[in-house]
Amino acid sequence: MIDKRLFKLPKAKIMLVMLAGLAVLQAFAILGQGIFLARAIVGSWNRHPFSFIAINVLLFFIMYLLRQAISWFQKWYMNNYAHQTTSLLRSQLLDKIYHGGIALSSRVGTGNLVAMLLDGMDEVSNYLALIFPKIIALAIIPWILLIYIFTLNALSGWILLLVFPLLILFMIILGTAAQARASKQYAGYVKLQNHFVDALRGLGTLKVLGLAKKYGQVVYKNSENYRKQTMKVLKVAILSTFTLDFFTTLSIAMIAMFLGIGLINGNLILYPSLIILILSPEYFLPIRDFGNDFHATLNGKNAMAQMFDVLSFETTTQEDQLPAFTWDQGSTLTVNDVSFAYSHEDQDKFKVNKNAKMTGIAKQKQTEDKHYTDELSHINLSLHGYQKVGIIGPTGAGKTTLMRLLGGFLTPIEKANNFTVNNTNLAQLDQKNWQNQFTYIPQEPFMFADTIKSNITFYKPDATQVEIDQAVHEAGLDNFIASLKKGLDTPIGEHGRGISGGQKQRIALARAFLAKDRKILFLDEPTAHLDIETEYELKKTMQPLMQNHLVLFATHRLHWLKDMDWCLVIEDGKIVEQGRPEDLAKNGTEFRKLTEPLKEGAL
């Protein structure tokens, strides 16, 4: 139940020492309750003076209030600790996501990260607030009570001692089953999140392809699976609660029976017997509380384990090995037998632990990776000057992964001499001077919750108004900007809420036109989700932009190939063919398979 990494949390040891001290105080408060309540009852039975009974009743209430005060303080302290810790974890996760970039989001999944930072944080906070007090109470309170009970009646002590391992055994059996089902439930929840987020992000593409309803059925199916998994977890939780209640009630009944027989036979006296009977339910209370909260904290445990996995993800620090340069006709980039895999031991930080166990989400992600590897194997490539290079291949072949690798967002498996830029050997392309040379336009360019002007000047914040107006004109945004009351100062929502997909792409193009000093263009299916008419209009805008640039253009729209000087055909993470499009049309087997649907004369 306890992840050892929890003890590395800030102030964890101080918190545990404080909880242990409070648990000891609470145990003696419980003992005091039992002792003074038994004295009051026995005094009343023996018709002692009211003053004697009143003092014991008063002392009982003092012990009761002390116990409640300890519980209240413990709850307040743990809620504060959980809140502070989750705030720190959220900050660390955001930093890790920022530095991990595409490598991390690709490995974990965007929907998973969203679930982790929103719902996952609430689950973790609940987990931290509950689990530590329950375990400390279970480790201390029953044993202090048991020692005192042994001093009163050894038989009762042995009954309680022998029943306790039996409860632990059933808890382990049912807890293991609950853990497995809860892991599947959480993995199902994350899968549902990923599908839902992907559906929102690709809704335009799905509509254009007529797949929106079909994909909706996928989301519905995942939601149904999540509902069924939740019900299975609840069944185990209810069974576990029933088992705990049954055995604790049975053991208390056995103790009551033996005490009753002893009182009838005159072997026992009322006062110690009554204390034992009062303390027996208190003896089992910590394990019952632990069992009940075990199921309430399973999702928190899974979320916490996943957060630790993300925080342990090894990010690559941007390097400055590449001297400052400007890409021109004489510049060269050579890719030297580069391989990449999300699941490689150097890249995959969601691997199996020493006991060959993994979290539900790790299993989920591993299963998904089997179907969508996007791995690259032994990539050799030479680029120079102002080439226009088309990258084609089936879905999942590795086109986007190759673009991200060349952009320096992903790190190859090998650690040295993977790339050569203008005679400089580099292990990776996450180089400041390299990334200052290119503009990246993906299928879904990111728009910030800011003005249109701020979004356009992303690459060049200090651009003059004349330069901005020129970029707006070249990107074909004149009419759109003129139609807005505030013009370039019009605010838009995050991810471009409030504007169309075509307008987002034109804003991304305006960024590229404005950054004229960047002579490399990465175009990752920039028109994939647009209709044919919008794409045709954008194409007229993009063609002038691609002049005097090194262009890498990944696309499924193969009519773009007639604008390319060179073509790479990727399949299963390998470059299977490369050459001029017109030569591949004659001699390229894989190229012809992909271009067969094109009408005659497309190239």
Image: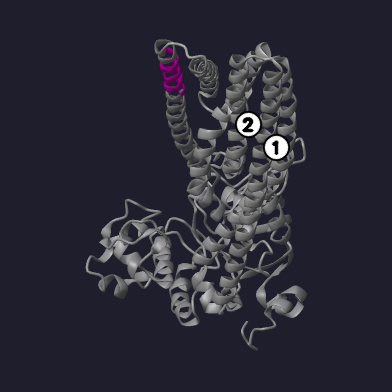
Task: Give the labeled residue for mark 2.
Answer: 287
Task: Give the labeled residue for mark 1.
Answer: 171
**Toward which corner of the image does residue 232 lie, by quadrant?**
bottom right
Q: Along the horizontal axis of the image, is 377 left or right of 107?
A: right
Q: In the picture shown, does residue 593 fall above or below 405?
A: below
- What is the tally of numbered marks visible in this picture? 2
Q: Is residue 232 visible?
A: yes
> Residue 227 magenta-drawn?
no
Q: Is residue 529 visible?
A: no
Q: Residue type at mark 2?
A: Ile
Q: CA distance from mark 1 to mark 2?
A: 9 Å
- Residue found at the very far left of the displayed protein: 485
Q: Residue at x 54, y 59 (%)?
A: 329
Q: In the picture shown, does residue 561 fall above or below 42?
A: below
Residue 92's x, y, as percent?
50, 37
Residue 47's x, y, as percent?
48, 14
**Toward which corner of the image does residue 79 lie, by quadrant?**
top left
Residue 338's x, y, as percent?
71, 51
**Magenta-highlighted residues:** 55-67
Q: Residue type at mark 1?
A: Met
Q: Residue at x 38, y 56 (%)?
A: 448
CB within 8 Å, label 1 to label 2 = yes
> Residue 66 magenta-drawn?
yes
Secondary structure beneath dot 2 equals: helix
